Image: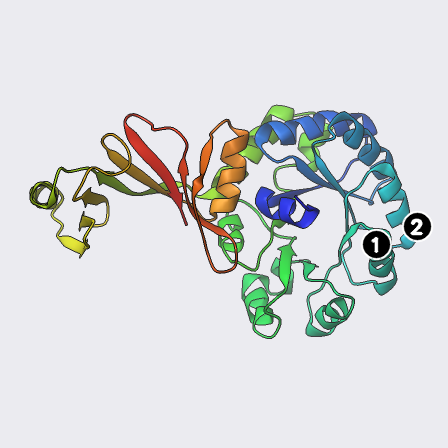
Amino acid sequence: MNITEEIYKIGIVPVIKINDVEKAVPLAKALIDGGLPIAEITFRTEAAEEAIKRVSKAYPEMLVGAGTVLTIEQAQRAKNAGAKFIVSPGFNPKVVQWCLDNDIVPTPGCTTPTEIEQALELGLNLVKFFPAEQSGGLDKIKALCAPYGNLKFIPTGGINLDNLKEYISFKKILACGGSFMVKEDYINNEEWDKITELTRKSVDAMLDLKIAHIGINSNDESAAKATSDVFNTIMGTEITKESDKSIFAGTLFEVMKFNGVGDNGHIAIKTSNVDRAVYHLSKRGIEFDPFTAMYNDDGSMKFIYIKDQIGGFGVHLVS
């Protein structure tokens, strides 16, 4: 997996300011425990370089990047310390070119067409959008995507639990950056449990997992019709869709006209992004059946079954 793809699947990039290097490793553990094995450690303090080095050594599985990189000298120090990607608040062509020449992913800040075209000229297809809320937010990103359709963004600045889901659901957002789960007070007071809890809540908010519908197996079409009639009577709904395979009683119950996947049927779980859901749920021990995966035209996953039945039901994710 390349760095950009990994950032996309993780989905959220915690932006960290470290004042005390001794707190870097326990902070990294708190993020990993919460489901985000990634961190952008900003060069806003003298502890940044050593923090990157210590976290990279303690948790090699963690994707560590350097933020607020303003010069080539800082980029070089960050790379030597173990950083896998470089993030800058603005567009500095010299820093970007150095990163490209030295095989490290650059993510410069671009909020105007002029900056974006400079980035495209250097072959970039990913930029930071900073400060996101103050620069026009998601509406501006959507407007910029009209002429620059192949570009992806990492918005940072003003992202929080209240607007995270809105940002991350837009397909041109590769990931969202934010410090809301790693506030400076939490770090200074070593409130690692609180950081882990907020990190987990952030992942859950991003994935936005919810029941899409419940599929119920039947022996034949007449049995399916009888079952759907009962559910429509109970729920006060009506048939909303019918095909050769099934009947939808309202939108919650799909009654199959045969014995389909699962002993009893199937449960469809909707998520904002199947790729990210598979990544994070796999980290929680859930196994998926890759042979059932279906994909969108852009290569992103839109459907996949969990490997084993749950309570006699096949369970699949859908976007």
Residue 257 screen position, x and y as percent? 16, 44
In this rendered view, identify the residue nearer to me: 109 or 136.
109
Q: Is residue 11 left or right of residue 257?
A: right
Q: Residue at x 82, y 59 (%)?
A: 96
Q: Which residue in the structure is indicated by mark 2?
A: 73
Q: Residue at x 34, y 28 (%)?
A: 309
Q: Which residue in the structure is indicated by mark 1?
A: 99
When the figure is inspected, residue 4 is found, relative to residue 138, above or below; the finding is: above
Tell me the amino acid under the disc marked 1: Cys
Q: Residues within 10 Å of mark 1 (few under 14, many from 20)?
A: many
Residue 53 screen position, x and y as percent? 83, 33
In this rendered view, identify the residue nearer to me: 264 or 212.
264
Q: Is residue 5 left or right of residue 212?
A: right
Q: Residue at x 13, y 50 (%)?
A: 237
Q: Residue at x 53, y 36 (%)?
A: 280
Q: Is residue 286 left or right of residue 244?
A: right
Q: Nearer the viewer, mark 1 or mark 2?
A: 1
